[in-house]
Image (cartoon, helix red, strand yellow):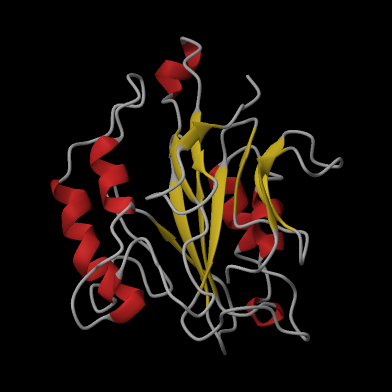
C-alpha cells in the first residue's frame, strides 16, 4: 500500500549493526535485507494475505531472523522450524553466494516448507515458485530468461531494469500481471532493488557485493547504490 510508511535500506537496528535493510515503520521489520556475511533475504505475502493481522506476528520479522545467520543454508534450516500459523501466509527467499532457498508458509500448514532454488532464473510472487498460472510470472519469466544477463561489474543492468519498469503486463490479468504496478486506489510499486552477490572466488579478490535501490517506482526513480560494509 502506497501510504504504508517505510525507510530506505540502511543500518536501522542497533542490535543488528551488520544488517542493512529497508524498514517498515508500521511494524518495525523489513521486506528485504542483507547482512555483512552476504546473506540476503526477502519476504512476500501470499495471495489473499495482504496487510497485517492483529492475531499474527509481522512477516517482516522473518527477514531479520534470517539475517541473524552467516549462511543461507543455516538460516533456512533454522526458520524451517517456525510455526507457520504464527504469521499470515508468506513466501520467503534466503540466499547467499552459494545457495538460495524458498520457504513457504501456507495457511493451515503444520510446517514451513523449504525448497532449494535451482540454478538459473527463478521468479516468485504471491503464488508458488515459477507458477505460470500467475499473470506476472507468465508474462515476465520468459522475458527474464531471454534478456541479456546483467553485468554488475560494469553497471549494466539495462535489460532487467527495462523489465522492472513495465507497467502493462499481460492483457486480462489486471494489475497482478504487471511488473511495475500503477493503480488509482492506493496500491502499487513503491520501490525496486537489484542485488548482486560476489562469488566465493570474487570475495577472495575483494570484489564487493552490490545493492542498487530505487526509492520509488523504477520507471520514475533512479537506481542508486546502497553503501554496504566491506
Give the image location of residue 102, x and y in percent.
Answer: 45, 60
Give the image location of residue 25, x and y in percent.
Answer: 76, 60
Judge whether 207 appears above or below 121 on screen.
above
**Quadrant in which residue 89 is drawn:** bottom right
Q: Nearer the viewer, residue 85 or 43?
A: 43
Toward the right, the furthest residue is: 14
**If the image is split into quadrants, where does the C terminus sit?**
top right
Judge whether 20 appears above or below 199 on screen.
below
Q: In the displayed structure, does residue 73 sit left or right of residue 179? A: right
Q: Nearer the viewer, residue 115 or 175?
A: 175
Give the image location of residue 17, x and y in percent.
Answer: 79, 35
**If the image is split into quadrants, where does the N terminus sit?**
bottom right
Q: Nearer the viewer, residue 204 or 140?
A: 140
Give the image location of residue 85, x and y in percent.
Answer: 66, 82
Q: In the displayed structure, does residue 163 sit left or right of residue 220? A: left
* Residue 96 visible to an observer of this rendering: no
Q: Residue at x 33, y 52 (%)?
A: 164
* Residue 55 visible to an observer of this rendering: yes
Q: Residue at x 66, y 61 (%)?
A: 62
Judge whether 108 appears above or below 99 on screen.
below
Amino acid at each position: 500500500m502506497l501510504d504504508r510508511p517505510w525507510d530506505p535500506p540502511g543500518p536501522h537496528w542497533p542490535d543488528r549493526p551488520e544488517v542493512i535493510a529497508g524498514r517498515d515503520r508500521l511494524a518495525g521489520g523489513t521486506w528485504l535485507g542483507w547482512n555483512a556475511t552476504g546473506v540476503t533475504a526477502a519476504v512476500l505475502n501470499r495471495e489473499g494475505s495482504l496487510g497485517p493481522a492483529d492475531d499474527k506476528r509481522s512477516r517482516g520479522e522473518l527477514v531479520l531472523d534470517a539475517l541473524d545467520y552467516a549462511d543461507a543454508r543455516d538460516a533456512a534450516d533454522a526458520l524451517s522450524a517456525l510455526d507457520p500459523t504464527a504469521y499470515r501466509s508468506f513466501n520467503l527467499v534466503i540466499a547467499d553466494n552459494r545457495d538460495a532457498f524458498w520457504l513457504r508458509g501456507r495457511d493451515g500448514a503444520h510446517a514451513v516448507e523449504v525448497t532449494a532454488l535451482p540454478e538459473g532464473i527463478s521468479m516468485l510472487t504471491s503464488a508458488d515458485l515459477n507458477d505460470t498460472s500467475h499473470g506476472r510470472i507468465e508474462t515476465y519469466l520468459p522475458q527474464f530468461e531471454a534478456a541479456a544477463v546483467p553485468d554488475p561489474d560494469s553497471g549494466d543492468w539495462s535489460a532487467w531494469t527495462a523489465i522492472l519498469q513495465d507497467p502493462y503486463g499481460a492483457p486480462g490479468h489486471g494489475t497482478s500481471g504487471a511488473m511495475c504496478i500503477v493503480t488509482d486506489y492506493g496500491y502499487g510499486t513503491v520501490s525496486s532493488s537489484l542485488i548482486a552477490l560476489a562469488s566465493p572466488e570474487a570475495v577472495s579478490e575483494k570484489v564487493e557485493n552490490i545493492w542498487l535501490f530505487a526509492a520509488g517506482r523504477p520507471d520514475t526513480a533512479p537506481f542508486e547504490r546502497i553503501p554496504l560494509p566491506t
